[in-house]
Image (cartoon, coloured by chain):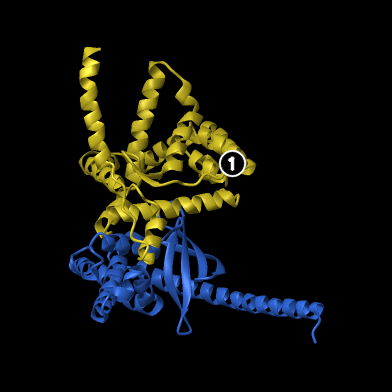
Chain colours: A blue, B yellow
Amino acid sequence: MLTRRGIFLLTTLFAGAARAAPAGDAAAQEATARAFVQKTADALLAVLNSSAPVADKQARMRPLVDSNVDVDGIARFCLGRFWRTASMAQQNDYLTLFHAVLVKSITGRLGDYSGVKIEVGRAQAREEGVIVSTTITRPNNAPAALDWLVVTQAGEPKLADMIAEGTSLRITTRKDYDSYLTRNNADVGTLIAQLRKQATTDGG
Amino acid sequence: MGLMTSRLPSLLIGLCLAGVLVGCATPPPASDADALAEYRENNDPLEPTNRVIYEVNDSLDSAIFAPLARGYRAAVPDSVREGVHHVLLNIGSVPLLANDLLEGHLDGAGDTAARLLVNTTVGLGGLIDVAQIWGIARHDADFGMTLALWGADPGPFLFLPLLGPSNVRDAVGFAGDIGLDPSTYLSGPNWLLFAYSRFGVSAIDARERHLDDLAEIKKTALDPYATLRSLYNQNRAQQIAQARGGVTQ
């Protein structure tokens, strides 16, 4: 029979092992996430700083978003509690339109970001993923801190959020949608109609 | 006296009407746990009133402030606007220094004092941020943050006339910063002129610096009020967390 001291020793050993394992994982995750951000930033800059016409840049940006951003994950996060109340058809419509609006909002502002530089800093494992800090410099602008949230999606690192001066893109969007839906009888159809408008209007 | 008494009832009626307008938000029923959690997180029990103030601010902004800021951007070269911004920051360094000290951030206070000294002299009254070039970066501190570090809760979210998003703690902090500014206590026509000019230029400078991001929010957000509220809450939380950690960057 185990003495009380024995149980104590065993639990501390196991607790130690349990703590040690994620710590090792965390370091590996951090390294992977940092490399991913560096690679994505390089690919992004290659498009942004090329002398190609804007239409070409937009065409090259779309596959970059598709392969490196967890668009469906972000979309679900942004719909929050209303994801469950949406019908299957609404969920599908919403995902498609969210994707279109996201790509449009990135590619629509490509012209604003020529001459940009991204310096990748340290990575920190958190509960929701790994936060990789970067510093963005643009001509005639003060350097700005931008944090990237990297999650693992089917074994691959994907971008799940961007955080500037403490403000998370996905949390802000979620709050926007939540308030809009609360004021529109929780009708996901109205949100879909708005997103459709954003996806189809010029310059949105 | 007669005038006073005859005005009193109408004043009371006005206040009562205002009382009707100053409505409180109705919390979601306890049965809807998700909605209730969201409501609590937004911390905006005065939402109906706040939205009215937001609408008024937004109308004034569209009619007056945004066009003024666009005019300022069009008429004044980048470098001059940057200089003006630096001068305003330099003037505001004294309350910043006071807050560094009240927060117990001696390193931050040292930086602020050094920046004030260097920029006022070598930087020609703050026109050029020489201290930044020398590696002494600016950091934020204000009385709202100081109160937070002293343990004050933010209190309900507020949308203030002209000033925009805030909360009870930060509104008190705003008044506190005026109290910590030595120029508040100077009198005479010249100082009054200085105070008014500084207020006006600060307003136009601040509005010009947010022309692009506010336009973007109004264009893309489905509920710009809720978006601004969320951005304000997140940004303040980060500033306070950094100040709490002693990080003055």
Q: Mark 1 — on which chain does it sit?
A: B
Can see residue B116?
yes
Q: Is residue A204 left or right of residue B112?
A: left
The residue to which callout 1 is attached is: B103
In the rendered image, the quadrant that contains the N terminus of chain B is top left
Query: How many numbered callouts?
Result: 1
Can see residue A53?
no
Is the residue B41 above or below the residue B200 in the image?
below
Q: Position of residue A20 (x, y in %)?
A: 67, 77
Q: Residue at x 40, y 36 (%)?
A: B84
Q: Looking at the rendering, which quadrant does residue B33 occupy?
A: bottom left
Q: Position of residue B68 (x, y in %)?
A: 25, 39
Q: Is residue A17 left or right of residue B92?
A: right
Is the residue B65 above or below the residue B11 in the image?
below
Q: Position of residue A141 (x, y in %)?
A: 41, 52
Q: Is residue A20 left or right of residue B64?
A: right
Q: Looking at the rendering, which quadrant does residue A13 occupy?
A: bottom right
Q: Residues within 10 Å of mark 1 (few under 14, many from 20)?
A: many
Q: Secondary structure at mark 1?
A: loop
Q: Residue at x 37, y 44 (%)?
A: B158
Q: Residue at x 55, y 41 (%)?
A: B131
List the single residue furthest toward the top: B1
Is the residue A24 above or below the residue B149 in the image?
below
Nearest the eye: A65 or A57:
A65
Q: Position of residue B61 (x, y in %)?
A: 25, 42
Three-letter code for the amino acid on which mark 1 is drawn: Glu
